[in-house]
């Protein structure tokens, strides 16, 4: 639209143009508008459409990025008021937010865990191992599905469950835990001679069980409190081997992990239901590891030991889409975000070269705790 063509941005005032373009709801459209002409590109960048659209589509990113690097070059977060630097930061914001908005899943998902890695202890392995925490059903193939710690005489016990997230870059908003009711830590005799055991039919098999109206007789082996940590392995190049060694086993991986985020402690109610723990603000989890810390035993079992038992763990968040991949940079706690195929913006195979040019670089995100006010940081 340059040269002899009519450019409506020159015909309309900037306020009206801003209102019109503010109605765009696809990151690909913002990128394409910026590729129409030099004038349009300047207007889109100066108006911050990519950033505002990203924050509108993904509100959790408002607490997101304290520092961004590009092309593996660390840029200072210091204040600089020179015009040229401000323009470069606007250009960078345009590229970064277009990239991020294109890479995140369009909606929150409840299946952000891809596999169980390890538990700090397991009472009976593999019958009570951490892999059962990925199954929402309490009975699977005729067997109770749960993880149980080893028994402890000290009520101030501390256990951990470590999981692998579906993506190395993921915004986590909520973590939900269902403790187990202690049918399995009670002696296998009826409480009264007149009470009979029942065979319950489930999943084409039978399981020995008490009658439903005696369910309250069984205690909940829940922790007093819970805390969440997120992080990455110390040596990313060794991740595949480390996770293979510790996957769903008894061993701890603490010596091989850097935790970059630790939540506050949340109290747990002693109830046999899914307990939802909403984080104070969405957390940008970089590195793909989540650990649940369980503090304090409440219920003594028949052997006078404390146990912690969990049936199901669910993580709610927004991971990367399949078209994008995040790779850790050494042990820096940063990841490089790249798209894996052309046309990743908007999943459009006919994306223009200008569209792809926006994604033709690596965005590097730090794993620092994020601020509500994104504008206070200078990218």
Image (cartoon, rainbow, N blue to C red):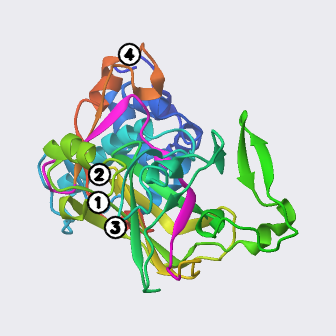
Kindly identify which residue carries mark 3: 261
- Tell me whether the residue at label 3 lies in contact with that at label 2, contact meaning CB atoms closer than 8 angstroms: no
Q: CA distance from mark 3 to mark 1?
A: 8 Å
Q: CA distance from mark 3 to mark 2?
A: 11 Å
Q: Residue furthest front?
A: 193
**Which residue is drawn at the image coordinates 50% and 58% (left, top)?**
147
Is 329 situated above or below 2? below
Is 293 left, or right, of 3 in this rendering? right
- Tell me whether the residue at label 1 lies in contact with that at label 4, contact meaning CB atoms closer than 8 angstroms: no
Viewer-side residue, 237 vs 60 = 237
Kindly identify which residue carries mark 1: 367
**Which residue is drawn at the image coordinates 36% and 38% (left, top)?**
99
Badge 3, how many Cα within 10 Å: few under 14, some, many 20+?
A: some
Q: Earlier in the sequence, mark 4 or mark 2?
A: 4
Return the x and y of residue 75 as percentages of the image width and height: 15, 56
Circle 3 or circle 1, nearest the eye: 3
Highlighted magenta segment, given as a residue range: 304-333
Q: Earlier in the sequence, mark 3 or mark 4?
A: 4
């Amino acid at each position: 639209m340059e040269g002899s063509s009519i450019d409506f941005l020159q015909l309309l005032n900037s306020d009206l143009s801003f209102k019109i373009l503010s109605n765009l709801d696809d990151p690909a459209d913002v990128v394409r508008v910026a590729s129409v002409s030099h004038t349009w590109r300047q207007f889109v960048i100066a108006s911050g459409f990519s950033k505002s659209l990203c924050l509108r589509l993904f509100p959790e990113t408002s607490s997101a990025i304290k520092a961004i690097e590009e092309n593996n070059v660390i840029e200072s977060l210091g204040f600089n008021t020179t015009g040229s630097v401000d323009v470069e930061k606007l250009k960078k914001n345009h590229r970064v937010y277009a990239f991020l908005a294109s890479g995140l899943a369009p909606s929150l998902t409840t299946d952000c865990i891809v596999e169980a890695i390890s538990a700090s202890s397991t009472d009976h392995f593999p019958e009570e191992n951490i892999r059962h925490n990925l199954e929402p059903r309490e009975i699977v193939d005729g067997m109770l599905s749960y993880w149980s710690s080893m028994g402890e005489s000290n009520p101030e016990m501390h256990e951990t469950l470590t999981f692998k997230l579906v993506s190395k870059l993921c915004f986590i908003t909520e973590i939900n835990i269902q403790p187990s009711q202690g049918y399995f830590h009670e002696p296998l005799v009826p409480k009264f001679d007149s009470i009979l055991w029942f065979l319950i039919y489930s999943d084409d098999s039978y399981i020995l069980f008490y009658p439903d109206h005696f369910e309250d007789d069984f205690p909940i082996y829940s922790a007093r409190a819970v805390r969440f940590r997120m992080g990455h392995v110390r040596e990313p190049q060794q991740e595949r081997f480390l996770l293979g060694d510790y996957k769903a086993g008894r061993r701890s991986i603490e010596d091989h992990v850097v935790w970059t985020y630790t939540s506050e402690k949340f109290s747990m109610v002693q109830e046999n239901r899914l307990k939802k723990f909403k984080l104070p603000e969405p957390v940008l989890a970089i590195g793909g590891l989540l650990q649940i810390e369980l503090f304090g035993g409440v219920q003594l079992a028949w052997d006078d030991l404390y146990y912690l038992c969990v049936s199901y763990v669910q993580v709610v968040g927004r991971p990367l889409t399949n078209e994008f991949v995040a790779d850790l940079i050494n042990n820096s706690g940063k990841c490089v975000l790249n798209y894996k195929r052309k046309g990743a913006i908007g999943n459009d195979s006919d994306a223009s070269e200008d569209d792809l040019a926006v994604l033709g670089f690596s965005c590097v995100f730090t794993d620092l705790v994020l601020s509500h006010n994104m504008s206070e940081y200078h990218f």
